[in-house]
Image (tube, rainbow, N blue to C red):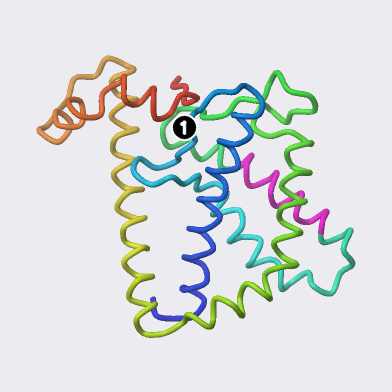
Amino acid sequence: MKSKAFFHFVWVFTGMSVFGFCFEVIVDLIQSGTWEGHQGILYLPMTPVYGFGFVLMVLIGHLIRRYNGWIQYGIAVLIGGGFEFIFSYIEEWLFNSRSWEYSNLFLNIDGRTTIPYAMLWGLMGYGFMRLWPILRKWMDRWYSPKSIIVTQVVFWLLMGDALFTSMVCWRAYERFHDQAPSNIVEQWIDTYFGDELMEAQYPHMNFK
């Protein structure tokens, strides 16, 4: 975990997850005038689907540089829309829940993404891929033994938050199905991360 690629991926994931959180909050404020949480993990203001999506853009970007801009944009549309679609399935498989439902929107695909959203993903992804060489050079200026230590700390904080979020979400699913806590950890989660907090934190998460 000391490679430059690891350094790049952690900070792309972190930065674009924060960007995704801010972007969705701003869109909600413009559309409805209300503040809604869009955190994908409990403690950090991040929407990880954006982080994973843009890391994938970085991984694919260098493979498609030889194509013209329209083809690159089309591939970014497929990556962004496809990733949002797949991420929805992963959440449903892990927690039997859906955090976004687009069935009432125009040109939706199984309610998991829409063609207009995929086109927006494509625009952001194409722009990011074009900017990535500049961003990479800027990031490389900060690459050092000290920055690797900071990166590793951030990585493990993210992993810890993600793991704890998974435990809390799984327990929320069990409560939805009236399952009593089976150990002291689940009792603690029920005390401090009950349904009221979960509904405030994840207003769009719907269990099945």
Q: Residue furthest top?
A: 178
Q: Main secondary structure of the magenta part?
A: helix
For badge 1, the amino acid type reads: Gly
Which residue is depicted at the point 50% across and 50% down? Answer: 18
Horizontal side of 44 relative to 134 (left or right) equals left
Q: Quadrant of the N terminus?
A: bottom left
Residue 159: % across, % down:
34, 55
- Circle 1 sits on which residue? 37
Horizontal side of 54 relative to 151 (left or right) equals right
Residue 140: % across, % down:
54, 81
Residue 64: % across, % down:
78, 69
Q: Is 77 inside the magenta-drawn segment? A: yes
Vertical side of 33 occupied by 43: above or below: below
Which residue is depicted at the point 31% across and 47% down? Answer: 163
Q: Quadrant of residue 29?
A: top right
Residue segment shown in magenta: 73-86
Q: Residue furthest left?
A: 184
Which residue is depicted at the point 45% across and 19% down? Answer: 208
Vertical side of 84 occupied by 133: above or below: below
Vertical side of 119 occupied by 98: above or below: above
Which residue is depicted at the point 50% across and 48% down? Answer: 48
Residue 10: % across, % down:
47, 65
| Label 1 Cα neighbours within 10 Å, binned few <14 / some 14-19 / many ≥20 | many
Q: Quadrant of residue 147?
A: bottom left
Q: Secondary structure at mark 1?
A: loop
